[in-house]
Image (cartoon, grey):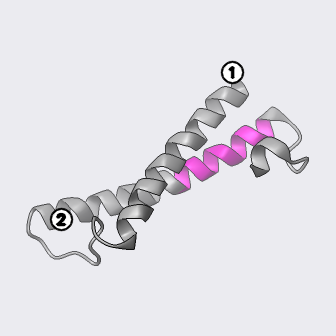
Amino acid sequence: MLLAGSGLFETPAQRASMAAVLALVHAGQFAVNAHMVGRHRRGQPGSWVVLRGPMRLIFFVDLAFAVADAVFVVWVLG
């Protein structure tokens, strides 16, 4: 909402840059959690269980935000 409706980022390039950073941050966290899912599926110990409890929500929200931010970048620059 900050990117779309605020005067804080006035040019499309500024909006796209901020959304790209957010997309990378969310994709990075998703990648770390996906690695943990793989470790648990292979029976290896991991630091946390991703697909149970509140981490499951965080896992899918990070994926959704990464995709949404990437789509926003394409939309703003398109």
Q: Is residue 40 left or right of residue 43?
A: right
Residue indicated by mark 1:
78
Q: Nearer the viewer, residue 14 or 69?
A: 69
Within the image, what quadrant is residue 49 found in? bottom left
Within the image, what quadrant is residue 74 found in? top right
State the extent of the magenta-drawn residues as a range.
13-25
Residue indicated by mark 2:
39
Within the image, what quadrant is residue 14 found in? top right
Quadrant in the picture for the C terminus? top right
Residue depicted at 66% across the width and 45% down the height? 19
Q: Main secondary structure of the magenta part?
A: helix
Residue depicted at 28% across the width and 64% down the height? 51
Q: Nearer the viewer, residue 67 or 24?
A: 67
Please name the amino acid that badge 2 sits on.
Arg
Q: What kind of element bears circle 1?
A: loop
Q: Magenta includes 6? A: no
Q: State the separation of the CA atoms marked 2 and 1.
A: 39 Å
x, y percentage for residue 15?
A: 76, 41
Q: What kind of element bears circle 2?
A: helix
